[in-house]
């Protein structure tokens, strides 16, 4: 994600999406998925949807036991999912 060409693509997509979550999923999410697909195929995962689904399942399993994996996964998600603040105050 941090390679210059990927960073530029992601920056442009985020600028186009603004604060609109639908546009974020439309413009940014596909770029993040493509970058992931390009990387994971080098590690033996099948190309396309099947590889991404398998990779995501493995990551969810590994992040339960490995804080570093959880942290890295959070960094990837942060590219297309903004942090959500949940208020614990009553809304009455």
Image: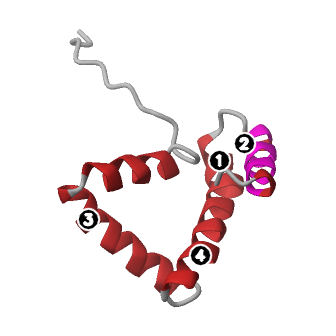
Task: Give the residue number, with chain letter if any, for mark 1.
Answer: 24
Task: Give the residue number, with chain letter if any, for mark 3.
Answer: 62
Number of marks present in the image shown: 4
Q: Nearer the viewer, mark 3 or mark 2?
A: 3
> Who comes first in sequence, dot 1 or dot 2?
2
Q: What distance separates the C-alpha of mark 2 from that of mark 4?
A: 20 Å
Q: What distance separates the C-alpha of mark 4 from that of mark 1?
A: 19 Å
Q: What distance separates the C-alpha of mark 4 from that of mark 3?
A: 19 Å
Q: Are marks 3 and 1 in contact (CB under 8 Å)?
A: no
**Relative to 48, residue 68 above or below:** above
Viewer-nearest residue: 90 or 5: 5
Task: Give the residue number, with chain letter if any, for mark 4.
Answer: 37
Within 10 Å of disc 3 (Cα), the crowding (few <14, some 14-19, many 20+) is some
Viewer-nearest residue: 55 or 65: 65
Residue 19 as seen in the image, left or right of residue 72: right
Task: Give the residue number, with chain letter if any, for mark 2.
Answer: 14
Quadrant of the drawing holding the N terminus: bottom right
Q: Is residue 53 magenta?
A: no
Within 10 Å of disc 2 (Cα), the crowding (few <14, some 14-19, many 20+) is many
């Amino acid at each position: 994600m941090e390679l210059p060409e990927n960073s530029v693509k992601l920056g442009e997509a985020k600028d186009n999406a603004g604060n609109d979550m639908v546009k974020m999923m439309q413009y940014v999410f596909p770029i993040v998925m493509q970058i992931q697909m390009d990387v994971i195929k080098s590690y033996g995962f099948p190309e396309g949807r099947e590889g991404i689904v398998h990779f995501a399942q493995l990551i969810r399993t590994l992040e339960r036991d490995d804080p570093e994996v959880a942290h890295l996964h959070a960094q990837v998600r942060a590219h297309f999912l903004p942090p959500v603040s949940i208020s614990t105050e009553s809304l009455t």
